[in-house]
Amino acid sequence: MKKLDAWVIGKFILLALLLFVFVFPLYWLVMTTFKPGVDVIEFPPRFVPSRLFFENYPRAWTEYSTSFLYRNTAIASLVGIALGLLIGIPAAYSAARFRYKGRDDFMFFILTTRFLPPITAAVPLYIVFKSVGMLNNVFALGILYAAMNLPIITWVLRAYFREIPIELEQSYMLDGHSRLKAFFKIVFPLSWPGIAAVTMLSVCFSWGEFLFALLFTFNIHAKTLPVKVAEMQGDIGILWGQITVIGTIALIPIMVFFVIIQRHIVRGLSFGALK
Amino acid sequence: MKERTRKFRPIFLMLPCVVFLLGIIVYPFAYNIYLSFFYYPFHMPWTRHFIGGGNYVQLFTDPYFLGSLKTSGILTGLSLTVETFLGLIIALLLNMEFKGRGVARMFFIIPLASIPIVNGYLFKLLLFPGASPITLLLMKIGLVNNSAFSWQAQTWSAIAAIVMADAWKWTPFMALIILAGLQAIPQAPYELANIDGASAWRVFWRITLPRLKFPLTIAMLIRAMDLLRVFDEVFSLTEGGPGSATETAAFYIYRRGFKTFMFGFASAASLIVWGIIFITCFLIIKKVFAEI
Amino acid sequence: MPEIRLKNINKTIEGKEILKNISLRIEDGLFTCILGPPGAGKTTLLKIIAGLESLATGEVYFGEEDITDLSPQMRDISMVFQDFALYPHLLVYENIASPLKAKRMPKKEIRKKVKEVASFLGIDRLLDRIPKQLSGGEMQRVAIARAMIKEPKVYLLDEILVNLDYKIREEMRSELKGIAKKMGRTIIYATPDPLDVLSMADRVVVLHKGIIEQKGSTKEVYTHPKNIVVGGYFGFPEMNLVDCVLKRKNNKLFITTDELTIDISEFKEKLKERKEKEVILGVRPENMNIATEAVQKRGNNLVKGEVVLGEVIGSDTIVHVKIGKDKIKIFVPRIYRVPIGEKIWLHFNTRDIYLFNRQTGECILG
């Protein structure tokens, strides 16, 4: 009996240790934002700040047009997920419920688009966007994000739709409702965990996307938060104070959102993964 | 065999998606192929001219390019190993029943929502020579003996730093997938093993691990695909340094193709990188799908 | 109300032929059973009638009207699925009300009708629950309520008793029969269980591997099966089948196995034209009796066997008896306990035998 206890305690210690390892960087990030400029880099490092400084945030808000950054990032992410769902859900549903020529080939094609490293599409897309004047445009960015989200959206949701017994929809149609209504009233509610999961994954990706945002935007009207963060690195070196503040500002909404929906995500991911 | 005329044709639900992707992904890709045969400095478009395989020759003889491929490979391998191993441990730990399990899980997966470019800077800060809490902690354990150790000064530590940043964000992903796989395993074999008195290691090896094969493979495949294209953390943490030691393929293309506006060159490089990723993934997926 | 006609229906799903050239007429107002083992194509057949499966060849008629291309929403049909297909995220009330909502009935009327049907089926106290909280029998009643509420012309029931306990199944059979009679609508009931057919159906269609083996009134198909598939399957317990040989000797006709010889000269005329020697003898378990002393004394058509098992089901017993190499079952309509290994004499009437051609399965006598 004694031996068993030691084993279990050991596991919990390991768990606590790992938890610490994974939470620590976040703590460090947030803690740094409350340090006055000079304290940011300390030799040797202090685990708890000696003094707290709250001015960083208001300053960042005014100096960096944070509201614009939020707006841009949000629009790009929203377009990315809304358009992605709009296009992806019908595709996923058709692949889940029906048999038609090319169905599996189309799904495979959609999957292969995920293989493309963003950099590969960067050059031609840059040229194309520039020629139609879509550079520095958050909506164009969002459209791009939608395309990048589609493989995950379609594949995960197809697995989800498949799980729902077709008799439910058939029964609903026999009741007299249209096929469209059957989708919205039956399939959609029942696949909510899956939809929440892909929404979260897509938003996470779009919110933090860097490469395209960097290459395709050049002023505050379209710049997103990740781009602004990288701007803090200049010829004179890195403005650590500012970087951590913008970084934290960028992280807050997404993390809050994430924490709220995380239970759905765990359920959603597990389903998609096992298929 | 022709099905009767039902006014509803399911293929029309799929087509918008396919067409959309054809336009946004495939068309640029094709354009890439075209461009790759040109010398095309974008800032001096009038000097653009056809050079056939010139870009490709240049690439294959460029030690930096080949080096970047190698770097991508090493990074992928290392990160994958760390993330899988740690993810497995975390999943096993989270699989235990205890109060506050949900809270613990929530804290573990928070890094998943982090922003890669921010992570790069964050870890750069965390590893700042002389002011680094990580170096300090490692000193306490005895792994490092210099508090002013510069992670960016040597190749191996720079790579380690990138692995750290990536693993911090993505280990929870592996853990989640593995955890889901663990929870799908029925109790029966464990109870039998219990009765038979099998050791914990044996139980894990013979019962748990085989059943994790599928979710593990899928997760590793997804991660490998993304790791081969890693860019953000390199941009922020090391900027490819020291020198070009941590220049991954994507960063190489950015620095030497995009920033220099040498678009033809960038196209060719992108295609080679894509080709490598595609063939690797294609082969693996075919193998995985065949086994199902 | 019109009858339902199916003409030349062929259905293939993912390369497999599920239904082969089905032509069928379902009479209006009657309880028709589609009887067949799992995989026979029963569910697909029902779904085609409901309009939930498309057809490449064949037509479906409601009376004179060709409804082959009519969408399921427009057909006046209700279907109850095997797993009941209750909407898990809706209340029982909303489940039942769904068809009326589709008809855009005013809320007050819906409320009234739902309460009516619910109390008719004895589930009105369950209206506020969700399907997850219901027992099997309760879920079934909700499914039936939902089907009934729009008062369709035709009811399609797909193996709805299969998921219930034995005891509840018996109760439901008589209840269903009662409701069916009361409503007087056309009911098409798919089942693998011959007992369902025997206790409820006016008509039966025996479906096997996508082909209709026989169709007709229950009594007709039961007493005169066309072939061994129908004869063998349609019975509870299943008909006993034994290989034997047809022998003509001294102007008499016998069937023989290793264990017994039975004189069937009375059928000499009937079987005059038949050439086959190898046949299969079929006797229904309920037609095999344990020979009393008196019968034993008379000595004909007696078979001696050894008891292998006695299965008490409800208030009846099925006794498994070994006769030589063959194992047969006899049906005793009371509780009969007999020790294993005991030797008993069995007796049956030659009027109750069936003979099937061993090659084709065709019924040559019966």
Image (cartoon, rainbow, N blue to C red):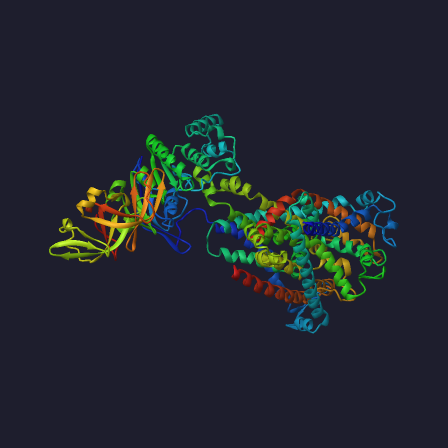
Image location (x, y in percent) of residue A225? 74, 49
Question: Please, is residue A203 above or below residue C314 in the view?
Answer: below
Q: Is residue A46 left or right of residue C181?
A: right
User: What residue occupies the far left of the structure in this picture?
Assistant: C251
Q: Quadrant of the N terminus of chain C?
A: top left
Q: How many marks?
A: 0
In this rendering, does residue A51 appear at all? yes
Q: Nearer the viewer, residue C92 or C269?
A: C269
Image location (x, y in percent) of residue C241? 28, 51
Image location (x, y in percent) of residue A36? 86, 47
Q: Nearer the viewer, residue C151 or C354?
A: C354
Quadrant in the rendering for residue A262: top right
Quadrant in the rendering for residue A259: top right
Q: Nearer the viewer, residue C70 or A175?
A: A175
Q: Is residue B68 left or right of residue C214?
A: right
In this rendering, does residue B114 appear at all? no
Q: Is residue B2 left or right of residue B149?
A: left
Question: Please, is residue C113 above or below residue A275 in the view?
Answer: above
Image location (x, y in percent) of residue B113? 69, 49
